[in-house]
Image (tube, rainbow, N blue to C red):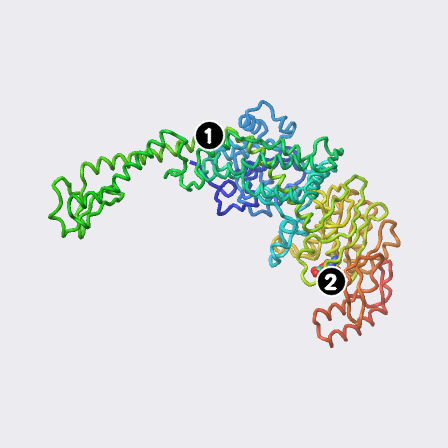
Amino acid sequence: TQILSPGTHFDEKILAAAHNNYLAALNRNGKAYGLAVIDLTTGDFKTTEIGTAAALQTEIERLKPAEIVHPAEDSHLKESLTNTRAIINDHEDWVFAKDSAEYTLRDHFGVRSLDGFGLKNRPSAIGAAGGALHYLVNTLRRDVTHLNRLVFYQDSEFLTLDTTTLCNLEILEPLTRDAPNTACLYNAINHTVTPMGARRLRDWLTQPLSDACAIRSRQQAVETWVEDGPRLEQLRECLRQVRDLERTLIRLSVGTGNARDLLNLRLAIEQFPNLCSLIDEALHGTSKLELNDASDWPLLSLLADQIKELPKLVALIARAIVDQPPLALREGGMIRGGFSDELDELRAGTKEGKEWIAKLQEKEIQNTGIPSLKVRFNNVFGYFIEVTKTHLGKVPVHYVRKQTVANAERYITDELKKMENKVLGAEERSTKLEYELYLQVRESVLEHLREIQQSADALAQLDVLAGFAETARLHGYCRPRVGNEGVLNIREGRHPVLEQTLLDERFVPNHTDLGGENQVALITGPNMAGKSTYIRQVALIALLAHTGSFVSAAEARVDVLDRIFTRIGARDNLARGQSTFMVEVSETANILHHANERSLVILDEIGRGTSTFDGLSLAWSIVENLHQQLGAKTLFATHYHELTELAERLPRVFNLNVAVREWNDQVVFLRQVVDGAADQSYGIQVARLAGVPAPVLERAKEILSNLEETDLTAAGGKKGGAQPRAER
Ligand code: ADP
Ligand code: MG
């Protein structure tokens, strides 16, 4: 008996191939929060320790578990789980306590110490991982033998992206529901060919690296394939055959698999030698086998080493399983002839018997002279001879009557009964034997469970790297230089999603230079000019660079960041019961608490949710704070013209604007980001583009010119009487 639950089911119809389905467990020991997640369908088992409730929340939102368990007595933990769709269950407290959790884990992995998992002095992580395992085994009664890896990871290994940033930058899905599904980074760059690769890509995009060496070694792998298109195509073709090796394997391991899974497993493993030799050729084929400081061995050769060729297993499955096995396990037809003598004999017996029965009808028609005589079969009576009522007189005496039906009588004979026993008995025994043979083959597969899982892990990475290479070739991406000097320079950068979805305009590339004296860029320009696009594009390029991918630019230098923050647009979060302004300031507060000189901050129109002067004052002091205290590289798109004055007051603040031309009282958008502040905001011209009626526009112009006579002073103070509200 096992208990199915949202976080642990195997239902193909509900599982999405490109998504992990996680069960999560939480724990708290002292100050640190422990989080562990298990995906039973892939064998993933990870745990981490997190410092704050907010960061825990972010990580939960990133992983999107379907089910969460927590220690029953810790009500505080439960309260911190407000924004998740997961089913939440509590579980006995003692299970999460360090000693019992450690015992659970040591027992499961058969080790004496957990230090090898990186869990030394990690009581919260141990508690969560042990708790998760205990819940699976004891409450849900699940088989967990295939969970033979446990990975401890930490925020600091990765570029931190808070939930707001993941949403705002539209990494995995578009911000608005009505946007096409493709309008997100994941879809724009996803060229993986296996579900394993797709899941890994989602992981890499939401957890980019924060170590230059690790990033460079991925880049080097991508470059190897970018330079060799034909070989890349071969590689991706091989990977396609591998399909979802992880889930196939796990289905076999937990006993829900069938002969088709064995077949698919063989087709996958058959590709291993090809894949390894493609990697080998690629590594030696490229002229510059550059061994940089990333590692002495290129990532690709490490991955090739991780792929374990299993020729004997392939041969076994090939000999055992037919090319088109049925879904059912207990109806026969799975095992190939020649694999088992016993099975072959049983099948021969069945065949002989069936042939004899097939001939019987002809023979009996001759013997009895009844032309309509039939030999038939049904599940209740087995084989019988049927004679219609008109011919009853001719029925021989040795026929034994079995059943009367409307128009006929049914008979058996001794001979037929004997043959029937032979056929049916043999058939039953042979399907049973087939099932046993299937189990034997499966057992041999499971002896290699670990090796195959390891190989699958390498293939998932290989698929993402090959996908990056494909994207780079298709869309002309470049390899960014990654270092630690703290600069962010982009030549001819493009927005990776918009450049693919833009229909009636060509995407105009733009440059970016941040770092050193260029710390805070204030971007002004009329509505619709392209400010928001530009600042998002910079963030997306920076993020992509941290995943090891090439980037949508002609040339880029992206030094390692620790976090990317975004605060974009005035957006209501009614679901959380907060007003626009409240959301806006609390997100901004988060940035001000956590940003530092290694962060990238993207601010779009902050201060919009309140009155002009409130908003302007807040925006003003936020820029000052970012400039003086935090030192974060910042791109700030704003409609507050007054802010551009800051460039003259603060040394590392500078102005950019998105150029427009005025022509016949119309605006023409050039989409070009240039130095300096915008001269005016063209609000009325943009309103014309949007179809506001002419009389309204004329009146607006009149009001505007009245207002302009009572301008604001540069310092943010008020010169005249009326308050300018033109740009609200
Ligand atoms: P703003 O924030 O200045 O109001 P957006 O960034 O929202 O403007 O851009 C408005 C529209 O302009 C975008 O939806 C896009 O269609 C177009 N656009 C923006 N930047 C570019 C560009 N570099 N090349 C081509 N079209 C662009
Ligand atoms: Mg905008």
Q: In the figure, is residue 310 to the left or right of 405?
A: right
Quadrant the N terminus occupies: top left
Label 2, secondary structure: give it.
loop
Q: Which residue shows up at 84% across the image and 59% down it?
A: 677
Q: Which residue shows up at 68% across the image and 52% down it?
A: 168
Circle 1 is placed at which residue position? 443
Circle 2 is placed at which residue position? 528
Q: In the figure, is residue 693 to the left or right of 113?
A: right
Residue 139 is labelled as: none
Q: Earlier in the sequence, mark 2 or mark 1?
A: 1
Q: Residues within 10 Å of mark 1 (few under 14, many from 20)?
A: some
The foreground one among 351 and 711 is: 351
Q: Is residue 27 visible?
A: no
Asked if disc 2 is less than 8 Å from ligand 1, the answer is yes
Cα distance between the residues tagged 2 and 1: 63 Å
* Residue 433, horizontal then vertical, whole percent: 37, 32
* Residue 648, horizontal then vertical, whole percent: 88, 54
Looking at the image, the residue that sits furthest to the top is 112
Q: Residues within 10 Å of mark 2 (few under 14, many from 20)?
A: few
Q: In the figure, is residue 663 to the left or right of 92?
A: right
Is 449 situated above or below 224?
above
Is 431 situated above or below 520?
above
* Residue 570, horizontal then vertical, whole percent: 70, 57
Label 1, secondary structure: give it.
helix
Task: Give the quadrant of residue 507.
Answer: bottom right
